[in-house]
Image (cartoon, grey):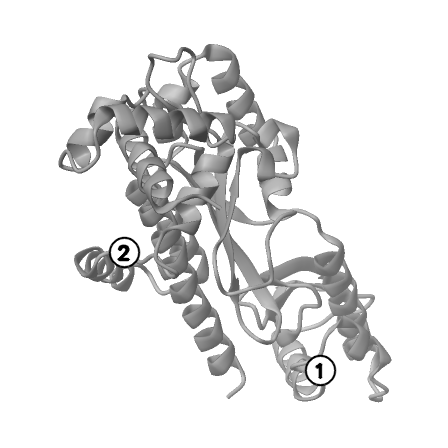
Amino acid sequence: MLSERAATVLNVLVGEYLQSATPVASDDIARSLGKKISSATIRNTMARLTENGYISRPHVSSGGVPLDRGYRYYVESLPETPQLSYELRESVDRDLAETEPDIGAWSKRCAAILSGLTENLAIVTAPRAQFPRLKRIQLVFLQESTALLVLVLEEARLLRRILPFGNRVNQVQLDIAASRLNDTLGGLNRSQMQSNQLELNSLEEQVKEGSVSLMREAESANDHEHYTDGLRLLLSQPEFSRGELARQLVQLVEERVLLERVLDGVPETENPAVFIGSENRDEFLNPFGVILCQYGSPKGVNGTICVVGPKRMGYVAAIGGVRHLSAFMSQMVQGIQGDHSE
């Protein structure tokens, strides 16, 4: 447990380092504290912080740089629920209000807003359900014995497939089949659709089988529809001036490795989780700070909002931004599901 003085010195040091990205000297800390603590006392305190693994100093006379433990103490010292300023929240809400009312457009815009707020990489995954539920079936006549099968899921996702039939069909027959199936299968998941014992004619049975097959593919798909923004901003940070680390990061993003590893650590809570350096599960994430939060609905339709940056990031803006945008996306998902249930 740090003393009050040590905690003050550490938090000032981390705050200064977040701004400058250069080692923070005792004189800098003294100026920030208004000379309330002498430089000599601060140097002694920094020595103890070094011994206890909160900061590092290449030389006794040099400034201090936070270590993972120092960043963690700083983050734990922040207000319990860091938030964006009122002005920023108002600006973000106006921006989102002007965005096309579509879950994909909202997800993409949230990624752009979050990368701008943090000057780091933002990732937003579109909402999806582990066991998707059908909202409605649509059938569009294409030619004599072929139709386009469109499934609208309750999570605002579309599934499509060309469906061939053994006999000729017309749009009237397709509309009747879709209407009958919607009356009985709407709101069900794939397993419930499959076990439904409704007596169907040949056309309706083919549509049901095609729908069940599409739903099964949706359940087993590992790819996450997602939006990223701010990679260039992240690469401009001093920590990534070394070409090797920058190339590694670009490769991780392009090969979707970063996305999959980050999603492995999403907690099922409404509050953002913060992983700093070695706290990340994967070693290749050790140079980074990762802040992420799950959003969605009680019905199990969820997505993730995430910031990936250097450990030296503006944690207040990052945590506040992730919190605000995840709350917005949860509200949108729940609104869509409410509309679908009417």
The first of marks 1 and 2 along the sequence is 2
Residue at the location (65% across, 74% down)?
A: 134
Determine which quarter of the picture holds residue 140.
bottom right
Is residue 22 something one can see in this rendering? yes
Image-based side of 137 in relation to 31, left or right: right
Q: Secondary structure at mark 1?
A: helix
Q: Is residue 11 above or below residue 65?
A: below
Residue at the location (86% across, 80% down)?
A: 195
Residue at the location (57% across, 31% down)?
A: 285
Task: State the residue in front, 38 or 92.
Answer: 38
Looking at the rendered structure, which numbered label has been put on residue 84?
2
Residue at the location (66% across, 73% down)?
A: 133
Task: State the residue in front, 295 or 197.
Answer: 295
- Residue 58, percent across and down? 43, 12
Q: Are marks 1 and 2 in contact (CB under 8 Å)?
A: no
User: Mark 1 to mark 2: distance in Å?
Assistant: 44 Å
Amino acid type at image mark 2: Leu
- Residue 115, percent across and down? 35, 41
Image-based side of 45 in relation to 207, left or right: left
Q: Residues within 10 Å of mark 1 (few under 14, many from 20)?
A: many
Amino acid type at image mark 1: Leu
Q: Secondary structure at mark 2?
A: loop
Residue under label 1: 185
- Residue 277, percent across and down? 54, 33
Looking at the rendered structure, which numbered label has been put on residue 101?
none
Task: State the residue in front, 209 or 220.
Answer: 220
Is residue 232 something one can see in this rendering? no
Q: Residues within 10 Å of mark 2 (few under 14, many from 20)?
A: many
Task: State the residue in front, 169 or 98.
Answer: 98
